[in-house]
Image (cartoon, helix red, strand yellow):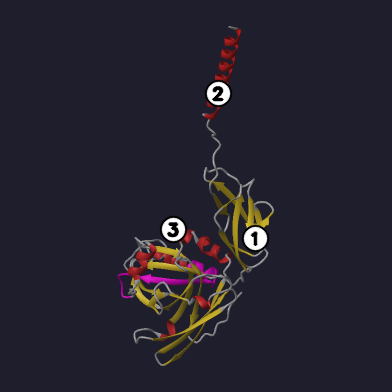
């Protein structure tokens, strides 16, 4: 009997132990599994001497920056930031628990060359527009304070109408008159005569491209050489060239207090856009002509129509970056002028 009881006790203990093992085997490990990493960089393009910050997150959206190791061109760095002191393109990735992140690139450019900044004012106007004299008056005030504002008056619905004005209005979202833009980016805040500083303030910006023109006239044939000095490693640039005419005299409606009379008899219209020698938004510069400290030039010819006054003709050249609307720089030139780049 004692023997039987002993055997039963041993069997009970064995069954109890095996039951405990089964219960342990059903426990679930809830520790998140890291299967991938995503690296983020504070800037994809910098100039030499600038610092870039790195961060990395795993597939569970957990920030692993503090525990990850970062590599630049396969060389491990200390910490999660790096100051690039060499020019070139650098591959950056991270590792955590032997898992490698995606690779991002940082482009490091030379320190840009700075040039004199001009500001472009574009005035969408017409002789029928009684409130457009508000912008005309503001432009006069700007010209009294600086010679570095380049103005283009784009007329609609009057004898000075520019053939491409509808295309320009559509592209820049002009829905009413008057409308004026600064550097094709910011609308000149109405009432414009009270917002002169909005224009003048742009002149303190840095310009990394400079324009210069040379021109000559042989009869009605106008030859223009436009030169562009590039001070930054731009990937894509467009060069534009317009013809404008000054001292055109037409009556102007006036519903403002800035001038006397309505209409204003024999009002002098200046900076009137007459012709786009290039595409309306400029022509692309070949990519092999771009680069830091490179110079591009192109010659244009234009037969001046008989209805234009040659003595009042000027050329306006402008440069924009890629598909961006904003002008990088702009410049005006009279016929026969031989300009140089300005810093």
Residue neighbourhood size for the residue with mark 2, other residues' Cα within 10 Å, grouped as few (<14), some (14–19), many (≥20): few
Give the residue at x 47% y 68%: 322
The span from disc 3 to disc 2 (Cα, nearest Å) is: 88 Å
Pair 3/2: label in front? 2
Q: Residue furthest top?
A: 1
Does residue 245 appear anywhere in the picture?
no
Decide whether residue 55 is among the magenta residues.
Answer: no
Relative depth, front residue between 194 and 245: 245
Q: Which mark, residue 50?
A: 1
Q: Residue at x 45, y 90 (%)?
A: 217
Q: CA distance from mark 1 to mark 2?
A: 64 Å
Circle 1 packing at 10 Å, graded few (<14), some (14-19), many (20+), is some
Give the residue pinned by disc 2. Answer: 18
Q: Which residue is mark 3?
A: 191
The magenta segment is: 140-159
Specify the quadrant that holds the N terminus: top right
Quadrant housing residue 132:
bottom left
**Residue 186 image offset from top left, x and y in percent:** 46, 61
Estimate the x, y position of residue 83 in percent, counting from the top left.
67, 59
281 or 97: nearer the viewer = 97
Which quadrant holds residue 112? Answer: bottom right
The answer to whether any part of residue 17 appears in the image is yes
> Residue 188's x, y, as percent?
45, 61
| In this picture, residue 89 sits left or right of residue 245 | right
Which residue is outermost to the bottom? Answer: 219
Q: Tell me the element at label 1.
A: loop
Position of the C terminus by quadrant? bottom right
State the SS at label 3.
Answer: loop
């Amino acid at each position: 009997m004692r023997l039987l009881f002993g055997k039963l006790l041993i069997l009970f203990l064995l069954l109890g132990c095996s039951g405990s093992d089964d219960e342990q085997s059903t426990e679930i490990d809830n520790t998140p599994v890291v299967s991938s990493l995503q690296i983020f960089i504070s800037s994809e393009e910098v100039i030499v001497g600038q610092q870039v910050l790195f961060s990395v997150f795993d597939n569970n959206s957990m920030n692993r920056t503090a525990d990850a190791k970062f590599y630049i061109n396969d060389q491990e760095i200390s910490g999660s930031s790096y100051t690039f002191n060499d020019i070139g393109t650098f591959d950056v990735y991270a590792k955590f628990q032997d898992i490698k992140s995606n690779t991002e690139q940082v482009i490091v450019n030379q320190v840009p060359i700075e040039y004199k900044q001009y500001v472009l004012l574009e005035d969408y106007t017409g002789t029928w527009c009684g409130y457009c004299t508000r912008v005309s008056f503001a432009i006069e005030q700007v010209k009294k304070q600086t010679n570095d504002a380049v103005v283009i008056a784009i007329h609609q619905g009057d004898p000075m109408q520019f053939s491409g004005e509808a295309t320009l209005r559509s592209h820049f979202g002009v829905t009413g008159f008057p409308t004026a833009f600064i550097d094709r980016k910011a609308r000149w805040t109405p009432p414009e005569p009270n917002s002169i500083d909005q224009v003048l303030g742009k002149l303190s910006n840095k310009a990394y491209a400079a324009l210069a023109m040379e021109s000559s006239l042989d009869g009605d044939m106008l030859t223009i050489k436009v030169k562009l000095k590039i001070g930054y490693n731009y990937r894509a640039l467009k060069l534009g060239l317009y013809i404008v005419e000054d001292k055109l005299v037409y009556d102007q409606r006036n519903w403002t207090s800035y001038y006397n009379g309505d209409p204003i008899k024999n009002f002098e219209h200046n900076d009137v856009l007459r012709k786009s020698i290039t595409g309306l938004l400029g022509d692309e510069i070949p990519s092999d002509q771009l680069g830091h400290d490179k110079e591009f030039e192109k010659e244009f010819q234009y037969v001046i129509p008989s209805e234009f006054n040659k003595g009042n003709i000027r050329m306006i050249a402008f440069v924009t970056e890629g598909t961006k609307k904003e002008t990088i720089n702009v410049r005006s030139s009279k016929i026969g002028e031989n300009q140089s780049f300005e810093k």
